[in-house]
Image (cartoon, grey):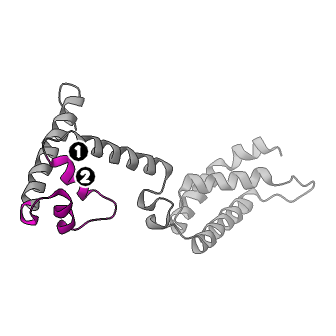
Amino acid sequence: MTHSALVGILHPLVRAEATAEAPGAGLEPADLEQSVWVRLLERRPRRGRAADPAGWVRAAVRAEVRAARTRARHEQAYRADALPGGPGGSPEGIVEDADERRALRAAVDRLPGKCPLILAAMLASHDPTYREIAGELGISQGSLGPMRSRCLGCLRRMLAAEVAASGSGGMER
């Protein structure tokens, strides 16, 4: 019997077996079905064998399920903080984070008055204290909090206006 004839005969059985066994192994039925078809196609045809295609399908599905369970026991997912680049460890995440930081810094630079200096100091990588920022900028430590609050409000309004203007007809979701 040719492979194509065998596929035609076994298709309903493979689908039924995969659908029945997949949930117990935490697999998608279509993935399990595909693994069984690959196993069938990799199989070497033997002459004069007593073919029990239904028995072979059941055995193949169960073997794939056992293999999937073994893989699941041995594989461990990476933690987000263990990926290169931290939580946004994918290359796309790293690029997106860098773009967001650049956009934020550009917006901070467009703020009026001392706001760019205050917010740039607060965004510094060495995480300065209020006392250090106030000393660096020559302002009192007590006025730094209210000034920061006003600057952040101004930044929020500016960014909200930019986002609203970028959408079609000012509607952004």
Horizontal and vertical percent position of residue 164: 18, 33
Q: Secondary structure at mark 1?
A: helix
Viewer-closest of 100 and 48: 100
Question: Does residue 132 appear to the left or right of 54 in the view shown?
Answer: left
Horizontal and vertical percent position of residue 1: 83, 46
Viewer-closest of 68 and 58: 68
Magenta stretch bounds:
114-143
Q: Which mark is residue 120?
A: 2
Q: Mark 1: which amino acid?
A: Val
Q: Which mark is residue 108?
A: 1
Q: Dividing the image into 4 quarters, which one contains the C terminus?
A: top left
Residue at the location (65% across, 48% down)?
11
* Residue 109 painted magenta: no
Viewer-closest of 27 and 128: 128
Q: Mark 2: which amino acid?
A: Ala
Q: Are marks 2 and 1 in contact (CB under 8 Å)?
A: yes
Report how far apart the C-alphas of labels 2 and 1 lie in the structure.
Answer: 7 Å
Question: Does residue 24 appear to the left or right of 173 in the view shown?
Answer: right
